[in-house]
Amino acid sequence: MHGLRTVVIGVVIACAAVVAPAAVVAPAAAVSPTVEASWSALSVPAAAPPANVSDLAARGPDEAWATGTEQGADGSRPLLHRWDGTAWSRDTTFPGSDEPGRLGKVQFVGEEAWIFRTRSGAGEILRRSAAGWSTVPLPQTLWTYQDFTAVPGAAWVVGEDSTGLKVLRYDGSTWTTQSTPDGVLFLMGITARTATDAWAWADTSNGTAVLHWDGTAWRDAKVPLPTNSNVHTMLLEVDGRMTIGGSQYTDGVGRTYVMSWNGHAWRTTYPPLGDTYTAAMVRGPDRALWLPVRSDRAFQSKYARVDGRRVSYSYGPERTNAIDVKPAALARAGSALLSFGTVEIYGSKPNLMSERTGARP
């Protein structure tokens, strides 16, 4: 929606640099109450509550990183947890782990893990290689850090300062500031496949639009988004597909839409998900789309599986005395799906939780 400025840290996957003509609206999806998916609880080292989760990314079944914040005496402190294929452990070895701040989006770039981090108002990229941690500071401090993405040879940070929209690009050695088309007010999110193939969704003077970077300039990709809609996430997939999730608003009432590009045309569907926030949507190992949804059971998480026009649901394990279970991020880890979020037990503040389904025996 025009004017929407929601800070989101999202999940980025690879894509193909293609732009399409017209959308095809498909009929509403069929609904099934449950799907055969067995979720199990994974133990997570506790944080100082209330804890919040920013992002989750996996590189195969034996490595994943989850980011967020916990409550410190002097404000929010960064949280970082690592999955080794067997268990979650907390990592406190990164520079400034004991200082106030926040960890945001995490991505894998070659053999390294890159994490966007803010502390004392300044932004930087944490990089973890086999040799340990290093940092890449931003060239300037922004008022708002909206999103971050990184690929071999390039990284972008988008946000805003006193002069307005800022798109900062890192080429491995230096930062440059990029311009956007006229009428672009704010970039809500950004993702990339390569250093010359990046995509962003923007708030513009004419509503929401999708932009594309081809290595030379940012241009309006002319994606036929539904009218009066916004974008929550964009999945850029290795096989050439591109999937967009968001909400369309009619008379103030929102409904979830999913757009997919198959290399030739856009297809738009409206799965019966209400107005579910789709920022955590991922492509699962079964090739269906998965995302967490608001559960109708206080003691269990709930997940939606969207396969074409069909939507089905599964529940996480029952948690004793839980009054709110919120998976915040999903990631494909080999043949499994990992979930990371928070659980609020009666009488306490939200703390960390993780779940898994489809794991190898």
Image (cartoon, rainbow, N blue to C red):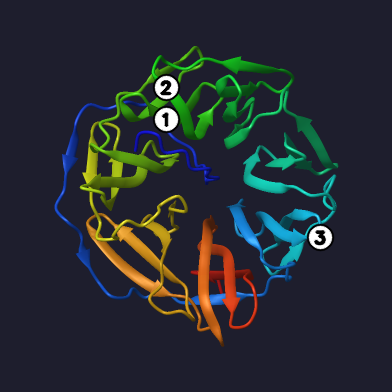
Would residue 271 appear left or right of 208 to someone viewing this image? left
Specify the amino acid type for callout 2. Answer: Val
Q: How crowded is mark 3: few (under 14 residues within 10 Å), some or many (20 or more)?
A: few
* Residue picked out by circle 2: 184
* Residue picked out by circle 3: 73
Q: Which of marks 2 and 3 is in front?
A: 3
**Which residue shows up at 52% across the image and 65% down it?**
327
In the rendered structure, are the residues bearing label 2 and label 1 in contact, judged by CB atoms less than 8 Å apart?
yes
Q: Residue 202 carries which label?
A: 1
Taking depth in this image into account, of 80 and 107 the one nearest to the observer is: 80
Specify the amino acid type for callout 1. Answer: Ala
Up-down: is 172 above or below 102? above
**Which residue shows up at 52% across the image and 46% down it?**
10
Would residue 204 appear left or right of 136 to someone viewing this image? left
Q: Earlier in the sequence, mark 3 or mark 1?
A: 3
Q: Earlier in the sequence, mark 2 or mark 3?
A: 3
Q: How far apart are marks 2 and 3 (CA)?
A: 40 Å
